[in-house]
Every structure is written in C-alpha cells, then in structure tokens.
Amino acid sequence: MDYKQLQFFLAVCEAQSFRNAAARCYVSQQAISKSLSNLEQELGVQLFVRNQNGVALTEAGQQLEKLARPHLNQRDEILRQMRSFHSKQQLHIGYFMGFLQELPPHFFPQFQEFHPEVQLHYHSYTDTEHSRCYRNYDCDLVITTSPLTSSDFIELAHSESSIGVILSCDHSLAKKNVLTTEDLKTVPLITLNTENRSQARLLECLQAKGLTIDSFLSDGELASDLLQKGFVSFYAGKESSLAENECFRPLSDLQLQWEFFIYGKRSHRITSLQRELIQQILSAVSPH
C-alpha cells in the first residue's frame, strides 16, 4: 500500500466513480481500476461495490477512508511545510565571537519571530584578520570590528562609541564621575582578547602612557568576578547592559573609539529586510 494507491482510493470515494476519479487524477480509468484492485488484494477486503450511480464503499472501505484521510493530510502538510522552508529567503549572518553579548537577550530569535518569511543562518568567527578573510565569503551580512579588505564586500554601516572603563560600584575610583589614565596606574587592568583596529590603538595608547594590561579576557562571567575583586576593564558598550553592581566611567584623556562595521556582499542587492536588521543592530549596540 503506497501513497498513490490511497490517493486514488480517496479520489474514488469523493467522486463515487472510477471514471470521474481518473479524470480528477489525470490518469486513465484503467490505471485507477488496476491500482485499487491491487490494493484490495493486498488488504484482503473488498472496498467498493458497483451500483446504478457508480460505486459505493463497503464497510471495509468506509473504515479505510477514516484511516487514510488523516494520513494523507499529514503527509501533505509535511510536504507543504518543507517546501515552504526551502522557499523562504535565506539570510546568512557572519559575526565575531563575543558580538552576541553586545545585543539584548534573544535579539535574533525575536527578529526571526517577527519575520517568519526569512530563515536566518549564523556563522561566528574569531575576531582576527585571518578569520575575517576566509570565514565570511558565503555570508550576506558580516558584522566585524575591523574593516574588511576583501573586494567581495561593501560597507553598509559604521558606528563608533567612546572607550571608557567599567568597575565595581564599590571600587574607590567609582566615587569619581570622570577618570583619567593616571587614575588607572595603581589598579589591575583587563580588556578583551581580540585582534582589531580599535584594540590595537587602545593597547598602543596605554603602553605610551605607561599602563600595563594584566589579563586578556573574553569570558563575561570571569570578567564580572574580577571586577568585584578590584580589577578595572575597558568598555565601550551600553551602560544599561552592565550588572547592577557595575558602573561605567569615561576617560577624559583617552580619546579613542570602539569601531563597529556591517558589510554586505557587493554582488547582492541589499533587501529592505536586511536594512531593517542593520538598523535594529545599530540601535541595539549604540551606547546612547
């Protein structure tokens, strides 16, 4: 018993005629008759009886109709959903590791929920020049902290935010509203372990001012633990994203910006949905 036999069987049930069922299924009446004859032999029951109006279901036929219809409906729904999935717009997003910490919780799932017509795919990479060169080729959008050198991509957005520091609210330096790099010379400093233009400029500037970075971190939980132990971390994100016991302080003598870029494939047309996503990302990561 296969799908085609059940399809023919239900067609005859609805049309109450082998001829009309054959026309509805775009096959010959002989093909319908042979298929259902094989089905009756396989099941060992008679499904139809002929009458003056065409054919009618036997008791066994009525039972098979009850069983077969939900089965075929379920199969058709599976096929519909799978075809719908493949017909969706596919959007591949490349982003550097750690980027999701910059966004509000459930940012991408919520965007997906509002746009069921698109299927999002995610590709994370370490934030190094080497990985930016080879990991993003198949992505529609690339989110990075350094300019892409590949001619395959075009810059779609560029955002900057001032680099300051975060520290525990109980830290002695938290009493000041604005700090200087001179204030940081007596405290242990940490920053993210990443390779980008903003980070390189920060390290060069700190070295010129005689400051030493004790640790390089990418683990948010460990960073929070160290802040409570008196460490100070460089930061350029939203103040609203900080824990309740953490605070942000600008550095008056450190005029550096953390850069943020979004690129698109040069050969692809930028869709309205991609523009909407870009705008939401920029709004989410903006410190203001």
Image (tube, helix red, strand yellow):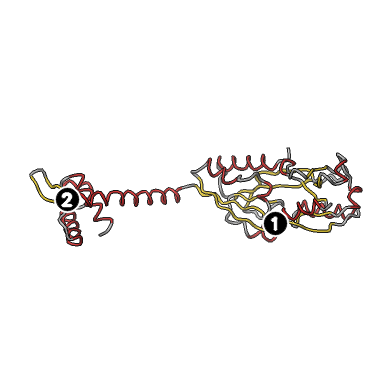
**Which tag, 2 or 1, sits closer to the chain's start?**
2
From this viewpoint, which residue is outermost toward the left? 52
User: Residue at coordinates 77% horizontally, 51% vertically from top-left?
Assistant: 198
Distance in Å between CA atoms under marks 2 and 1: 69 Å
* Residue 127 image position (x, y, % from top left): 70, 56
> Which label belongs to residue 194?
none
Name the residue beneath numbered marker 1: 127
User: Residue at coordinates 27% horizontally, 51% vertically from top-left?
Assistant: 67
Q: Quadrant of the N terminus?
A: bottom left
Please tell me which residue lies in front, 241 or 274.
Answer: 241
What amino acid type is highlighted by mark number 2? Glu
**Number of marks drawn:** 2
* Residue 28 image position (x, y, % from top left): 18, 53
What amino acid type is highlighted by mark number 1? Asp
Q: Is residue 90 left or right of residue 228?
A: left
Q: Quadrant of the C terminus?
A: top right
Please tell me which residue lies in front, 218 or 97.
Answer: 218
Q: Give the structural element (helix, strand or loop) at label 2.
A: helix
Please tell me which residue lies in front, 275 or 245.
Answer: 245
Q: Are marks 2 and 1 in contact (CB under 8 Å)?
A: no
Name the residue beneath numbered marker 2: 59
* Residue 271 image position (x, y, % from top left): 55, 42
Place residue 203 in its image quadrant.
bottom right
Q: Residues within 10 Å of mark 1 (few under 14, many from 20)?
A: many
Please tell me which residue lies in front, 167 or 199.
Answer: 167
